[in-house]
Image (tube, helix red, strand yellow):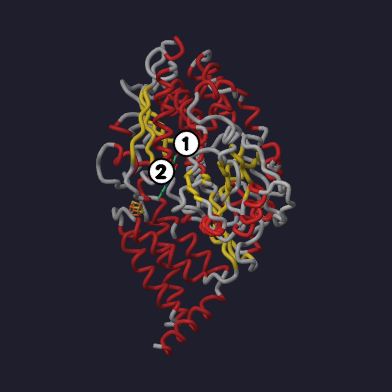
Amino acid sequence: MSMKIFLPRDTTTLALGGEKVVKAIRTEADVRGLEIELVRNGSRGLFWLEPMLEVQTQNGRIAYGPVEASDVAAIFDEIFNPGLDSELSEGNTGDAHPLALGNPEEIPYLKNQQRLTFARAGITDPVSIADYLAHDGFKGLENSLALNSQAIVDEVKASGLRGRGGAAFPTGIKWQTVHDCSADQKYIVCNADEGDSGTFADRLVMEADPLMLVEGMIIAGVAVDATQGYIYLRSEYPVAYQIMNEAIANAYAAGYLGEHILGSDKTFHLEVRLGAAAYICGEETSLLESLEGKRGMVRFKPPLPAIEGLFGKPTVVNNVLSLAAIPFIMEKGSQAYADYGMGRSRGTLPFQLTGNLKQGGLVELAFGPTLRELVDNFGGGTETGLPMRAIQVGGPLGAYLPASQWDTPLDYEAFAAAGAVLGHGGVVVFDESVDMTEQARFSMEFCVAESCGKCTPCRIGSTRGVEVIDKIRSGNNVAANLALLDDLCDTMIDGSLCAMGSMTPIPVKSAFKYFSEDIALAHASSLAQTETQ
Ligand SMILES: Cc1cc2nc3c(=O)[nH]c(=O)nc-3n(C[C@H](O)[C@H](O)[C@H](O)COP(=O)(O)O)c2cc1C
Ligand code: SF4
């Protein structure tokens, strides 16, 4: 007998735990003499926390929710001996019976989310215009075409939407700047470089609901009078590339892209361009350089890209999630979006849980709950079973937060007050076995590797930073080197041209501030290593 096992992500890039599931599946199939084929799922099932098991046998398709390696044998029993009582461990599928695909209402943790951006994910065929229309697709565009451009910009401003790429700049204000420029050509550029560690929400938008992004970009074009859009996509996302291109081709064929959109006098063309795997090309000015065919180096600002962006023309650069929020806002109205959230953080953010957690995955919530609630309610504890010790929020430039900070609400201002950032919503959990001085070193080393090299505080500062951290870790003149590191970090903060250099000190400083006891441990372990050599 043969069967296909669909996994939600490429087996080579599965998050923690995924590899174990794959291994368990292979072992189980071997034991039972089954021929199996592991298939990358592409889009279906993405609304489950990963890894999710979806099985296609000769009799049809069966799906299970979040799966652990220990569940696999019981699931196989369920499939091949459906009469038997299987003993799936508590907290995983929550149900020993197969779940029908496309029925998120039955998944308990989905009920506890507020899925605006990911409302259609896993339910519709991602590239089908008919499916998209049947689930309220293109209504935001229709409403927008009935308005004048300023009214669209006003609606986006009133929604309170802030850029989801990291800096949280109000999207409507950025659009206003481009709207107010007069130019023979303007551009909409979607930043789909998604380089932050532990993040994958952009990818899931593009794989699960790409037409929503297409619609958001068309509306942006109509709002600021831009007729050309580019999606700058990281090359590590080949499935997203394929699905996006298919969705764009279908949108052209159905009259949503090109000239006279839906019979109007509006034109919008859209193309996907691939990046070449440089973290710095996620920074908007580097991205524009790269899109123009040059090396990805950061530009001086001003001029802002909104005024002189791609090929020197006024350009809206927005993150995937920012643009993907637009169809909802223009369909349901700014107030419907602004009704979610707290303070100046309006709407929802798809948080991405990764690291040492039993259940990693995407959780879309309105701003407001605490970091602890997010991780406790959705993460299922650490995979190792050891207590959690540190959580890094906001990608590689975000702070490492100790338990004393986990009651901070998920809100841009509350995080800023705690010396942290929400960034793109990446949440990476570490258990108590982590050596935080090693994490601090990693943060500096990341900057060494990814710096574009244009300015000295970042290029040289990060290299010297690694050396100073090494001295601290090996117990060499610790107090003096800590003071030197602090000074170096302040120079990077004050003197760097972009946030790569000015934010790298955030994780470094937080690691030493909150976890200083690890310095002595790192020293002891380096001594032990020297003695054994
Ligand atoms: C080093 C660095 C990397 C960045 N990487 C990304 C990225 O991968 N995706 C993204 O949308 N924004 C990234 N940004 C932020 C962008 O520069 C820019 O603020 C964003 O694309 C604007 O879109 P938004 O207003 O919708 O957030 C990065 C910034 C820096 C400094
Ligand atoms: S801070 Fe770093 S990445 Fe940014 S411009 Fe300077 S050298 Fe380049």
Residue 292 position, x and y percent, is 27, 36
Looking at this view, name the residue that lies furthest to the bottom.
Answer: 531
> Image height check: is 66 above or below 356?
above
**Exactly how many numbered labels are in the figure?**
2
Which of the marked residues, 1 or 2, is nearer the chain's N terminus?
1
Q: Which residue is mark 2?
A: 237
394 horizontally vs 286: left or right: right
279 horizontally vs 166: left or right: left
Q: Is residue 300 visible?
A: no
User: For the residues marked 1 and 2, what is the alpha-carbon distance in whole angstroms?
Assistant: 9 Å
Residue at the (57%, 76%) spot, across then down: 517
In front: 168, or 248? 248
**Marks 1 and 2 close (CB-CB < 8 Å):** yes
What kind of element bears circle 1? helix
Q: Which residue is mark 1?
A: 206
Badge 1 amino acid: Met
In front: 130, or 212? 130
Looking at this view, name the residue that lies furthest to the left.
Answer: 294
Disc 2 crowd rating (10 Å Cα; few below 14, some 14-19, many 20+) is some
What kind of element bears circle 2? loop
> Image height check: is 237 above or below 496?
above
> Image height check: is 327 above or below 385?
above
Badge 2 amino acid: Tyr
Residue at the (57%, 61%) spot, across then down: 356
43 horizontally vs 73: left or right: left
| Quarter location, residue 433 | bottom right
